């Protein structure tokens, strides 16, 4: 749903997509280097137990019944820190990707932080579980703004996200904040 919406924002053939069985950890690692924009529409998880954080993105399950740890279908926080990122923005369109323990002077230890530490200039992540349909519209509107920015001119990411939220909020069926307020921007506006 989201992928199709984003593809419509950009010229034909300019968006590379890894879907379903193609979206393995290895392929994702190979695909992220050198990308201007990244978008993950998948399931996210955060578990805080005994002061530790287990968090990650769910990718394609490996075909091997005993997969290696670096291709087990879970792109975990410690693995995200090692990604070779140089993107302007990573959009984590998955549940609770900006949730985690708060550390004084450091902020939230969450998936979003992992992407920033890996080299993403900014991250759009979510504060709670997000519904599919309004999120697809919101993220599509966000990428419409990114795709429509003139070449060589800076993109106003905070403005693009704000405007995308407004476009969802004015629709009566999506007016409740649960449908549009979860995505937040970390990094420069």
Image (spheres, helix red, strand yellow):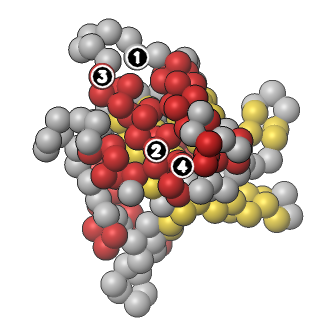
Mark 3, residues whose alpha carbon is within 10 Å: few (<14), some, or many (≥20)?
few
The image shows residue 6, relative to residue 77, as above or below, that is above
Mark 2, residues whose alpha carbon is within 10 Å: few (<14), some, or many (≥20)?
many
Q: Which residue is mark 4?
A: 134
The answer to the question of whether label 2 and label 3 lie on touching residues, with beta carbons closer than 8 A, is: no
| Residue 61 sits in quarter | bottom left
The answer to the question of whether label 3 and label 4 lie on touching residues, with beta carbons closer than 8 A, is: no
Q: Nearer the viewer, residue 164 or 121?
A: 164
The Cα–Cα distance between marks 2 and 1, rounded to whole angstroms, is 20 Å
Q: Who comes first in sequence, dot 3 or dot 4?
A: 4
Query: Which residue: 54% across, 63% down?
Result: 43
The image shows residue 90, relative to residue 179, as above or below, that is above
Judged by depth in the image, the label closer to the viewer, 1 or 4, is: 4
| Residue 188 sits in quarter | top right
Q: Which structural element holds mark 3?
A: helix
The Cα–Cα distance between marks 1 and 3, rounded to whole angstroms, is 9 Å
């Amino acid at each position: 749903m989201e992928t199709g919406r984003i593809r419509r924002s950009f010229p034909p053939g300019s968006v590379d997509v890894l879907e379903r069985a193609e979206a393995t950890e290895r392929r994702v690692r190979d695909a992220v280097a050198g990308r201007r924009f990244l978008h993950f529409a998948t399931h996210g998880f955060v578990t805080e137990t005994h002061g530790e954080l287990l968090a990650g993105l769910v990718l394609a399950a490996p075909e091997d019944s005993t997969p290696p740890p670096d291709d087990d279908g879970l792109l975990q926080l410690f693995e995200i820190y090692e990604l070779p990122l140089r993107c302007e923005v990573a959009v984590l369109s998955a549940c609770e990707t900006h949730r985690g323990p708060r550390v004084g002077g450091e902020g939230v230890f969450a998936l979003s932080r992992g992407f920033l530490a890996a080299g993403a200039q900014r991250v759009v992540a979510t504060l709670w579980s997000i519904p599919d349909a309004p999120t697809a519209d919101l993220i599509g509107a966000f990428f419409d703004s990114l795709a429509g920015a003139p070449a060589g001119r800076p993109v106003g990411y905070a403005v693009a996200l704000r405007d995308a939220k407004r476009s969802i909020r004015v629709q009566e069926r999506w007016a409740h904040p649960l449908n549009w307020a979860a995505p937040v921007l970390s990094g420069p506006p």
